[in-house]
Structures are given as structure tokens and as C-alpha cells.
Image (tube, rainbow, N blue to C red):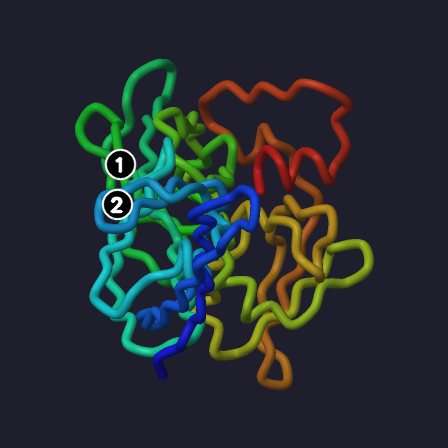
Amino acid sequence: MKKLILIFLILAIIVGLGGCYSFTLKRITETNYGSLNITSEPTGADVYINGEYKGQTPLYIGGVVTGLEKGEYTILFEKEGYESIEKSIIVDEEKEYSVHSSLPYTVSGKVTFQDVGVEGVVIFFGDDLESVVTDSDGYWSKSGLQGERIVTAKKEEWLFNPVEYKVDSANDSVNLVGLKTYENAKILDAEDIKDLDSVSENGSILTFKKSAPIMREITEDNILLIGVTPETPYGLLCKVTNVELQNNKYIVETESASLNDLIEEGTLEVTGRLLPRVLFKQTLF
């Protein structure tokens, strides 16, 4: 609805003895304005509306002076380290509009073993995103990431240090170092852990669901590595001594194992106080 704004324009024409004043009354019709609440993840993105710089997120645009007239607008988000995003909006009512953008970014890195690139390593970024594979020189890259992501790597008979790498902006140095494990080593990932029902207090007895796919692979003399989980708060590295099916559950009996039983070749560097939780959570799992 159009507003009527009354503006009194006072013109003093003659000021002097017996001064005379003239007044003009003018009525101006103003156009409706819409307001914009512009946000982004992360904050601090530069905002351009139809090519004109308006400020950084979070940003509010509204009112007669700074608001938007009816029409279509292109909003550009830019921030160093992130890919630019454009969004369009049509302002056709006198109300507040909200525009939000999660800025995508690109990460890349290299997987090496003794300073040589490792080919065929699968790099993961979460269950909802497609993985990538390292090339013949060990390099990989992933675009279109949004928000915080956990980068992990996987290859049969390999471990990688660090096991997980958190990213939330562009980074071209997400580098991982490979460690070769023995053929009898089994590294249980998140999918495998879902089928782990319980762990005895000393970690010597593991109970798996009968339907657990991993149980088609676990046999006596396997070395098992399990990361930090609710069932294994300090991680678990053990050797399988016996596997039995009891009451529709697999009972896996184990004994203690060492890193020498797990790692065939490679260099593991840890700086600081080495505790079980630090070792498994930050270095191995």
C-alpha cells in the first residue's frame, strides 16, 4: 500500500520590517520498500546487490532510504577462501525477506608413503558426499564442500595419519601419511562398529550381531583395530584368539596386541604426552 508523506516546505521570501512569509504544502507519493535480512555461513561475506557493494554478513537492508523497491535482485556472496555464490530474489511486497547462503569451498592434498605418493586411496567427506580417489602421484581435490567436514582416508591394508582431518574453509594442504599394515590386520570402520553389541571391561571379549558383515572376514589370529567409541573409550588394539557363534551372537575372544603386530612398515610420529586416548583418537582413530 502506498504511503502519503506530507512535507512542509517553508520558504522565507522577505525578511525585514513587516516581514512576509509564504508557505507551500506539497504531497509526495512514495513507492513500497522491502527489507532484506542477509546471512551466510560463515559470517563476514561481502554482499553485492545488482553489482553494488552493500556490506558484510550478517546484513540488514530496510527502510525508505536503504530498502529495496519492487523488482528482481541478484545477491552475490564473496569471501576469501570460499567459492562465490549468487542468489536471486523478487521483492513484490512490503515485508522482510531472508536470504541465506552456505559458501562452498575446495580442499585438496596428497597422500604419501615414505615421501612417495600413494595411488588409489579413497578420500571421504561424510556419508552424504561422493568420495574421491588419489591419482598416480597421490594427489586429490574436492570442491563444493559446505560447513565443517571430516576428511578421512581408506585403502585395504593401510592406515593413515592423521586418521581424520577437520576442514571448514579452503585448504590445499590436507596431507596424509600412509602406514602399511600386515595382511591379517582388520581396521574396523564406523559401519563395522554399528554391529558391535558390547565389549567386556578388559576388552578381551567382543560381541557382534550375527548379521554383521565384518564377521565374514574376522578369523583367529586377525589383528583388530577399533577407534574411540562408546564401547571402546580408549580405542582397542587386539589379536583374535577364538571366534564362536553363541545364541545368535558372534563371540570374539582376544588378547592384547601391539603396534608392531599391526604396522608392517611406516613412520609414526607423535609429539607430546602419549596416552591411549591420544594415540587412538588423534593418531590412529
The answer to which quarter of the image holds residue 78 is top left
Alpha carbon separation for disc pair 1 and 2: 7 Å
Can residue 211 be seen in the rendering of this structure?
yes
In this rendered view, identify the residue nearer to me: 209 or 153.
Answer: 153
Instruction: Identify residue type, mark 1.
Output: Ser
Q: Residue reaching furthest right?
A: 201
Asked which secondary structure carries label 1, the reply is: strand
Q: On the rendered structure, is 247 left or right of 222?
A: right
Dot 1 or dot 2, earlier in sequence:
2
Asked which secondary structure carries label 2, the reply is: strand
Can you give x and y, in whole percent of width and height, for residue 58 in the image? 50, 50
Can residue 127 be seen in the rendering of this structure?
no
Residue 82 is tagged as none
The residue positioned 74% from the left and 26% from the top of the image is 274
Query: Which residue lies under the disc numbered 2?
Result: 132
Q: Residue reaching furthest front?
A: 17
Query: Which residue lies under the disc numbered 1?
Result: 141
Q: Is residue 256 above or below residue 265?
A: below
Quadrant containing the C terminus in the rendered view: top right
Instruction: Identify residue type, mark 2.
Output: Val
Residues tagged 1 and 2 counted as in contact (Cβ below 8 A): yes
Q: Is residue 190 above or below residue 5?
A: above
The residue positioned 38% from the left and 56% from the top of the image is 101
The answer to which quarter of the image holds residue 23 is bottom left
